[in-house]
Amino acid sequence: MRIRWIRWIRWIIAAALLSSLVMPVAARDEVVVYSERKEHLIRPVFEAWTAETGIPVRYITDNAGALIERLAAEGNRTPADLLLTVDAGNLWHAGERGVLAPVESVTLNENIPVHLRDPDGRWFGLSLRARTIVYSTERVAPNELSSYEALAETRWQGRLCLRTSKKVYNQSLVAGMIAHDGVPATEQVVSGWVNNLAAGVFSSDTLLLKAIAAGQCDVGIVNTYYLARLLRDDPDFAVGLFWADQSGNGTHVNVSGAGLTANAPHRDHALALLEWLSGDEAQKLMAELNLEFPAKASVPVDPLVKAWGPFKSDPLNVAEYGRLQAEAVMLMDRVGYH
């Protein structure tokens, strides 16, 4: 009996010690972020948040698909409070997968335009990227350019460069075209692009831009920040930017964005961080780090980006890129755009 009593006392003491070690960690003030964005683009932002609030941010980086599946597998055991990723298609898939929670926030609704956020409040765009036409300043005059569709005309045969269709940015671009014009018209355009290719598709927008500068092709379609990076390093880089479709639907825009996870352990802090990311300080910092556009329209852009001038952007809700992504992929595959 005495031995049992001693064992019981020891068990209680051990449990108490274990509790004292575990509980402070579980209750610690922090936010955990699963991020597709590279560390050098998010670390300064999170450091600014911590300096202002005293709340640390821990983050894990990986590609969007892996992070979404990880959240689904972890379920209510996940340590993650926020999912941060690029492209509305990825955000839409995360919402449909059930790993994001809808939120009601006056701050987010005021700061982020309605077409740059999920209609169900599961995610919000935080920085804006435009995907538009670029051209050789030595071989193409801006007045020769107009729309994405016009790049399918025969006068661009052997003069067009494209990035691979496997990249979600091009899947979203084609999905947006399907939303506006339907499958048959979009298929005809994309088929025309393939016929006009000067070379095989490129693995990155940067390689595409360098191919134009080197004379391998004359025109292409890229996210603007890739050109901005090259111009920052070399102001004489011989590639210009043209805002596509200004007489039609407007230039295609996409987002990087974030949403609260469905099982966020630190929900209040996570919502506070998400709201802060939509505010002036964070919006300016995020846009400057990657030479993107702030999602909050009143925040100024980087001077290099501002030099391209204002443009009409497509007002389509970016959630459509996710909804129509599978159809866009099948369309591109049918016409041999790989």
Image (spheres, rainbow, N blue to C red):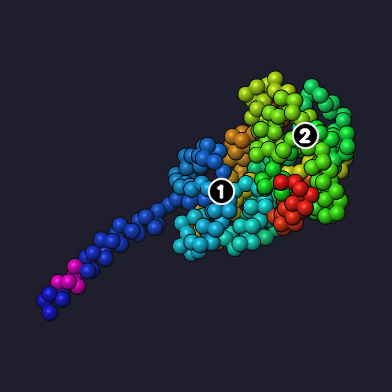
Residue that sits furthest to the bottom in the current view = 1
What residue is at 64 percent from the left and 25 percent from the top?
A: 232
Q: Nearer the viewer, mark 1 or mark 2?
A: 2
Counting from the top left corner in percent of width and height, residue 201 is at 71, 39
324 up-or-down from 245: above or below = below
Q: Residue at x 75, y 25 (%)?
A: 215
Q: Is residue 120 left or right of residue 145?
A: left
Magenta stretch, residue numbers: 6-10
Residue 322 showing in the rendered view: yes
Residue at 67 percent across and 50 percent down: it is 88
Residue in the foreground of this view, choosing between 20 and 158:
158
Question: Which amino acid, mark 1?
Answer: Asn
Badge 2 marks a residue whose secondary structure is loop
Badge 2 is on which residue? 198
The answer to whether residue 169 of the structure is visible from this angle is no
Residue located beneath label 1 in the image: 63
Classified by dominant secondary structure, the portion drawn in magenta counts as helix
Q: Quadrant of residue 306?
A: top right
